[in-house]
């Protein structure tokens, strides 16, 4: 057996194992990140960027309401006021998930998306005297490491949670946010994006997803009522869904498992509406079970083409029969919009409910801009919120996913 591999015993000796500038720069970051306390993320980022001439670095995190980018208040990086996502260069970087460069009197201000598995953590901003393709390449890789570092350290601290809050959060909302997967996932064959409103008072709405090999599993639930009782029911329903999904039972059996879990823990008049889906990302075959939930909408060529109507069974907790599984074949580029009833039943004081027709009109308008699903989901949620005067009497949750083929 040779050390160099591929049958060449001398190849190992001919390898250049010296450390290039880029490897050294990223290597020092990785070597120190392992045992770094969360509050010292700032000095490590600043030191790394300074070695390539970077000045005034800033780490910006998205707030829970998805309205602002908030500076992370840690030693070593610039602070400042929150920046509006819709009206700032950093916000443009965030929405478009791409680097934005802005000329300034002292150089170039570069905004880089902090991406982790398609979920956007925030934005890394830094000023340099000059920039070229080599610098851009290093900055992209540094931003990737910073995103991974923030996600890893997030489990050890409250610092990032506190930074993202622009107003007080209810205990029920605290429970719901801790239950959620990342709000977005962008993969070669499939993309997912979700939004919860009201962000700081959500209680009974929740969703979950998992990409297991080629199968995307997704569920949306809406527990009756408000406050802690609804949050607790949603937690039980999502927990039962995850357990059933992980032991690889069929969709109709997942419903029965969730139904039994909720019925055993709550009074007979308590229930959860739910929708469970399974998408084969290799073929585009979508299967779903509807338990008293609004029918999802199929979006094709940037327009809503139909509701995905299907036989429904009783909401989870009411002891319904084993449900019928529905199926449809998606085409590449198709999107499916799932939503809770709070989105269409909400109304301004004394006015009629918004209804599905107005929802479809808004979806069609936003789809014409041909934005990514993360931007569409966010814009749709905020459009609906503005239409009802920035208030809501019920949770209003959106999950949008796209099969890319």
Image (cartoon, helix red, strand yellow):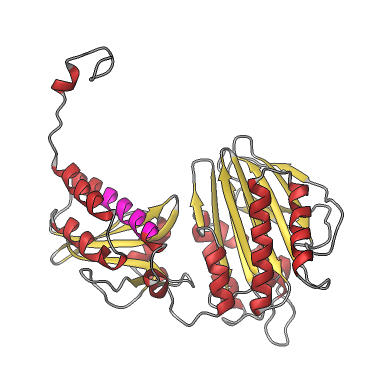
Residue that sits furthest to the top in the current view: 7
Q: Nearer the viewer, residue 264 or 219?
A: 264
Q: Nearer the viewer, residue 95 or 142?
A: 142
Can you give x and y, in whole percent of width and height, for residue 363 in the image?
Answer: 61, 61
Q: Name the side, left or right, on which 259 lies relative to 180.
A: right
Can you give x and y, in whole percent of width and height, for residue 220 in the image?
Answer: 66, 60
Residue bounds of the magenta highlight: 139-152
Residue sitting at x 78%, y 59%:
260
Report if residue 149 lies within the magenta region: yes
Which secondary structure class fits the magenta region best? helix
Can you give x and y, in whole percent of width and height, for residue 44 in the image?
Answer: 21, 60
Q: Name the side, left or right, on which 60 lies relative to 307.
A: left
Look at the picture and state if 277 lies above or below 214.
Answer: below
Q: Name the side, left or right, on which 404 lies relative to 63.
A: right
The image quarter in which residue 199 lies:
bottom right
Residue that sits furthest to the bottom in the current view: 350
The image quarter in which residue 384 lies:
bottom right
Quarter that holds the N terminus? top left
Look at the picture and state if 170 lies above or below 288.
Answer: below
Q: Is residue 109 visible?
A: no
Residue sitting at x 64%, y 68%:
205
Q: Name the side, left or right, on which 222 lies relative to 72.
A: right
Report if residue 191 lies within the magenta region: no
The image quarter in which residue 180 lies:
bottom right
Quarter that holds the C terminus? top right
Look at the picture and state if 387 lies above or below 178.
Answer: below
Residue sitting at x 60%, y 82%:
391
Q: Is residue 47 visible?
A: yes
């Amino acid at each position: 057996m040779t050390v160099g591999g591929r049958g060449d015993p001398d190849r190992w000796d001919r390898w250049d194992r010296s450390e290039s500038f880029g490897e050294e720069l990223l290597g020092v970051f990785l070597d120190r990140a392992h045992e770094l306390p969360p509050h010292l993320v700032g000095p490590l980022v600043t030191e790394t960027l300074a070695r390539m001439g970077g000045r005034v670095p800033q780490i910006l995190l998205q707030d829970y309401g998805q309205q602002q980018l908030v500076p992370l208040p840690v030693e070593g990086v610039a602070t400042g006021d929150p920046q509006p996502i819709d009206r700032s260069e950093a916000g443009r970087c965030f929405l478009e998930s791409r680097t934005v460069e802005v000329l300034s009197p002292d150089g170039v201000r570069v905004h880089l998306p902090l991406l982790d598995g398609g979920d956007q953590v925030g934005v890394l901003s830094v000023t340099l005297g000059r920039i070229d393709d080599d610098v851009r390449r290093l900055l992209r890789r540094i931003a990737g490491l910073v995103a991974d570092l923030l996600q890893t350290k997030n489990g050890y601290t409250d610092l990032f949670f506190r930074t993202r809050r622009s107003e007080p959060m209810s205990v029920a909302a605290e429970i719901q946010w801790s239950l959620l997967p990342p709000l977005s996932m962008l993969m070669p064959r499939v993309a997912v994006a979700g939004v919860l409103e009201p962000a700081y008072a959500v209680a009974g709405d929740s969703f979950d997803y998992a990409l297991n090999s080629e199968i995307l599993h997704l569920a949306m639930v809406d527990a009756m009522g408000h406050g802690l009782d609804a949050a607790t029911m949603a937690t039980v329903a999502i927990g039962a869904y995850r357990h059933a999904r992980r032991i690889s039972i069929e969709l109709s059996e997942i419903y029965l498992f969730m139904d039994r879990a909720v019925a055993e823990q709550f009074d007979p008049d308590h229930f959860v509406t739910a929708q469970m889906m399974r998408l084969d990302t290799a073929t585009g075959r979508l299967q779903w079970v509807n338990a008293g939930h609004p029918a999802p909408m199929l979006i094709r060529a940037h327009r809503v083409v139909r509701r995905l109507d299907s036989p429904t069974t009783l909401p989870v907790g009411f002891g319904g029969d084993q449900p019928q599984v529905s199926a449809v074949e998606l085409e590449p580029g198709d999107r499916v919009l799932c939503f809770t009833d709070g989105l269409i039943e909400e109304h301004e004081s004394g006015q009629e409910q918004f209804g599905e027709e107005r929802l479809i009109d808004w979806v069609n308008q936003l789809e014409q801009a041909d934005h990514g699903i993360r931007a569409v989901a966010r814009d749709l949620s905020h459009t609906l919120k503005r239409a009802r005067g920035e208030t809501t009497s019920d949770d209003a949750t959106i999950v949008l996913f796209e099969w890319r083929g």
